[in-house]
Amino acid sequence: MKETLISTRRINVDRVTLTSRKSLQDVLSQLDAAVGRPDIEQFWKRMSEAKTTSGMETVVQSALGPSGFMQFARFDHGGVLHKGKPAGYSGVIRLIIGNPLIMREMVKHVPDAGCYAPVTILIDQRPDGVHLSYDRIATFLAPYENEQALKVARGLDTKVEALLTEAAA
């Protein structure tokens, strides 16, 4: 019988939250305009058909929005949370966005970085405004002490935070 090795690593995370006075719909519209929204099945089909790195990069570039990100998934947590309640519920939206080329650079140096890319953005309506929350990837990767991966992660964090700032403004 083979042994299974289990290890545990404690990771402290920096969560960035911006609060906007804009409506939830306005924030989502701003994000939708900045983030590519490809047909994800077609995207993965084209990725698997790409024979070279440059072919794969072409597929990725065609899926990205002006922000340099694409949407992989969108979950309407608010629709689940408020099912059966009167219309007008507070929205809670989870976006999974990223750029496979950025992920590739992080995972080359720290394979566990694949757990954190693409990234999650949570957008939710609260009494004080619309909150946009994001967990910095550099804080996830800090315990691995790999400067190349951290450099990529910091660049990713900067891009995501710029996207959120623009959507919230």
Image (spheres, grey):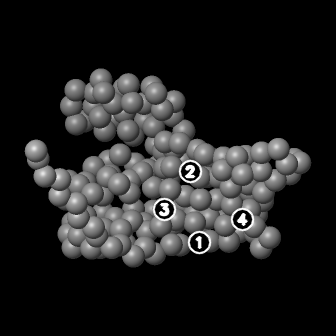
Q: Secondary structure at mark 3?
A: helix
The residue that appears at 89% across and 48% down in the rendered structure is 86
For the residues labelled 4 and 3, the Cα–Cα distance comes to 17 Å
Residues at circles 1 and 2 in contact by the CB criterion of under 8 Å: no
Circle 4 Cα neighbour tier, 10 Å, few/some/many (<14 / 14–19 / ≥20) = many
Label 1 belongs to which residue?
17
- The residue labelled by disc 2 is 95
Q: Amino acid at mark 1?
A: Thr
Location of mark 3 (residue): 160
Q: In the current view of this chain or complex, which residue is farthest to the right? A: 86
Residue in the image at 32% along x and 52% along y? 114
Q: Is residue 109 visible?
A: yes
**Where does label 4 land, which residue?**
130
The kind of residue on which mark 2 rests is Leu
Q: CA distance from mark 2 to mark 3?
A: 12 Å
Q: Earlier in the sequence, mark 2 or mark 3?
A: 2
At label 4, which amino acid type do we have?
Val
**Amino acid of disc 3:** Val
Residue 167 vs 50, above or below: the answer is below
- Whole-angstrom CA distance, mark 1 to mark 4, is 10 Å
Of the two numbered discs 1 and 3 in the rendering, the one whose residue sits closer to the viewer: 1
Name the residue rendered at 71%, 69% in the picture: 20
Where is 39 relative to 128, above or below?
above
Label 2, secondary structure: give it: strand
Q: Nearer the viewer, residue 90 or 100?
A: 90
Is residue 88 or residue 155 the one in the foreground? 88
Q: Secondary structure at mark 4?
A: strand
Circle 1: element type: strand
Front-most of residues 137 and 10: 10
